[in-house]
Image (cartoon, coloured by chain):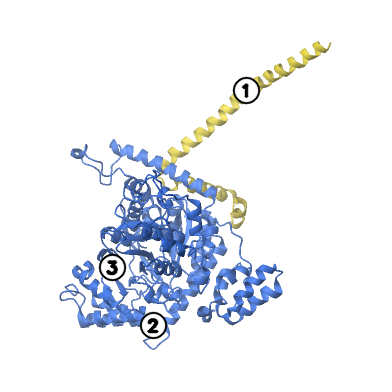
Amino acid sequence: MKTTVACRMIFKNLREYLAWLYYQYLLITGIYVLEPWEKSIFNSILFSAIAMVIYTSYVFVPIHVRLALEFFSGVFGGQTKSTMTLMN
Amino acid sequence: MGGCFRQGASALAARSGRLSISPSRRRVPEFTLNDARSGRDIITRFDLNMTEGSASKTFNGDACHRSSNGKSAGKNGYVKNHCMYRQPQKYRRPREKNRNVPHNSSLYKTPFMESFEETPLMVAVLTYMGYGILTIFGYLRDFLRHWNVEKCNVAREREEQKDFVPLYQDFENFYTRNLYMRIRDNWNRPICSVPGAKMDLVERVSQDYNWTFEHTGKVVKDVINMGSYNYLGFAENNGACADAAIEATHKYGVGVGSTRCEMGTLDIHEELEQLVARFLGVESSVAFGMGFATNSMNIPALTGKGCLILSDELNHASLVLGARLSASTIRVFKHNNMQSLEKLLRDAIAHGQPRTHRPWKKILILVEGIYSMEGSIVRLPEVIALKKRYKAYLYLDEAHSIGALGPNGRGVVDYFGLDPKDVDIMMGTFTKSFGAAGGYIGGKKELIDYLRRHSHSALYATSMPPPVAQQIITSMKIIMGEDGTTLGADRLRQLSQNTNYFRRKLREIGFIIYGNDDSPVVPMMLYMPAKIGAFGREMLKRNIGTVVVGFPATPIIESRARFCVSAAHTKEMLDTALEAISEVGDLLQLKYSRREQPLPSLGWMSEESLLQARWFVYGGEKKEKEKRQQQQEQQRDSSRHTDCQLLQEVPVPDMDNARATTPRWCASS
């Protein structure tokens, strides 16, 4: 939907396109009608939340993935070994 | 630039109030119509199935059995075997499919096309999210105001009232303070010229985010007016009407200084009333100085305690107020939904009044011709059939439809080609199509004489100023063609052309528009709260004045812009407006419609329509046998070749053009 409209709307440059995207963001979230200080509150809360999500995922996801891998390799690895020993 | 929003506020109050008639959900002994004392002969007639499927649905769907313990059905006032009462009555729009099916199409002489495209789910979710965010900020601001961090600009309780019931805490007030105020610049813009097709606006700015406005002293010139109810373009400061009004002012002055009952009846009023009666095709009529009061003061004169009023859920605030003032029992049926109306009527007759089960003294059905927020036209043929069947009275409010609909401009009765005598009370206003002020009621002579003596509007309200009466007389004569010219007919034709053109174009561009294809009120959906404000502002930047409508007047997610097409609009103006609307639609992402775009038109004309329809059926299409048989049956009745069923069979995607098959509009294209 965005692409078709972007075709219909003629943008001179990227800057204008980004401005339009920001305008859409204002309209859809409804903060278009807010006063500037409210807008900045909303934006800062939203962006800090997003930033925190990204940061935490950057920090914790690799650890969790490693732990999970270790756990599952432990579970499955142990099992194969034990069956092997049984078979032997 | 009407005060839709404000008017809406009362409409909301009205609406919510009406909904409060509702429901006790308790299962109560239910009873079938078979048992009802008077129900026997009614039930036999139900088999005729007045509104398709309603009888069978309601009777098969709800198991209706009278319980043997013999407790009374209407224990606390209402008959509770009524599905309307069992579920919470909230405004739910039926799915689009249901709306498009013409019920009882044999009653209609012309195709009855009304569409209400469903709200896209994503849009609905985002709209609610937007309202959620704004509500959070509203609470934040209220919090700051409460602790005097920021100045409170609106009324609030005084210190000494602290422990009393809060006055400004309800949702209405919250909404006004925190949502409406932010986009208030879109409403109540002062106009400083005649509000014709173009108008001049007083430029104003706000330094404090719409809490106060100041005028810059400049004027925004030549704004295309898409908001006024100037359907026939009689809002003029020159021409025959204005001249006649000036003459009347010279003759009579402006004020009358008394009521109709005392010293306020002038010969011009008598002339006006006779003319109105002739225009409407009724025996007699009475004119009042205010349209709103015509409804709100005359309904109490017509019904009282022990009467039942059946009111459409989207009726105007004036009708609601009148119904409430009358002290009658009010029951609300779903918008334009004949099954719902029939069910209420049937229950009313079968069960009678609550507790006593005496029959109702009167049953009055309140409907409007064109619903001003939906652009829908009342299903009058069906309403009249129901009214006759159940021996109820019909009150038809033609505020928007008089002058704007019908080949002769005589409103919705004329539009459907019905007999005005079938409508008991014909009410209408002079404020819209006639470019004047006031309202009328037409009907039987006894009714009108009764109203003259009992209506507050006639007894206590100052009578209509002579220039206004003269404006109405002159414009009405022009519409009737009694001035010896075809100006009136031209205006009517122009209006229907403009309406069809404007609606078709908007749909082609991809907007969701509501309502009947022939209604000059064109609501265009905006949905999101921020887009209400943005649309109004962007349109004004492009020199087009529009009315945007928000929550109290509409359901919360269905915010809309409402255009009123006028005969005064030229095609260039409409094109300019459409171009701007399309541009803003791209900018704001308003082209929600997911409907397939219509194919190139078939270019039907009145004479050729039948031939072409036949060609389509026999030559052009490989139809199944049964379909063909159906059509042959219809073609036997060749006089009704524009019946909706026929049009339904033939795949005509472009219904606006199919409209041209109607003989009465044929001269237009």
| Residue with the mark numbered 1 | A64
Report in which chain the residue with disc 3 lies: B
**A41 is higher (above) or lower (below) than B588:** above
Q: Left or right: B340 with respect to B214?
A: right
Mark 3 neighbour density, 10 Å: few (under 14) some (14–19) many (20 or more): many
Secondary structure type for disc 2 = helix
Disc 1, SS: helix
Label 3 residue SS: helix
Within 10 Å of disc 1 (Cα), the crowding (few <14, some 14-19, many 20+) is few
Indicate the position of residue A37 as horizontal and vertical percent values. Answer: 40, 41
Q: Quadrant of residue B250?
A: bottom left
The residue that label 3 is drawn on is B294
Chain coloured yellow here: A
What is the drawing colour of chain B? blue
Amino acid on which disc 2 is placed: Met
Q: In which quarter of the image is residue B655?
A: bottom right
- Horizontally, residue B457 falls left or right of residue B88, namely left
**In the depicted view, which residue is nearer to us: B652 or B392?**
B392
Q: Distance between the residues labelled 1 and 3?
A: 74 Å
Q: What residue type is labelled 3?
A: Thr
Q: In this view, does B573 lie to the left or right of B247?
A: right
Nearer the camera: disc 3 or disc 2: 3
Q: Nearer the viewer, mark 1 or mark 3?
A: 3
Please state the chain letter of the residue tagged with numbered disc 1 in the rendered image.
Answer: A
Label 2 sits on residue: B480
Q: Where is residue B578 in the image (x, y as percent from the top left)?
A: 51, 65
What percent of the width, then of the height, locates residue B103? 51, 65
Q: Do labels 3 and 2 share a chain?
A: yes
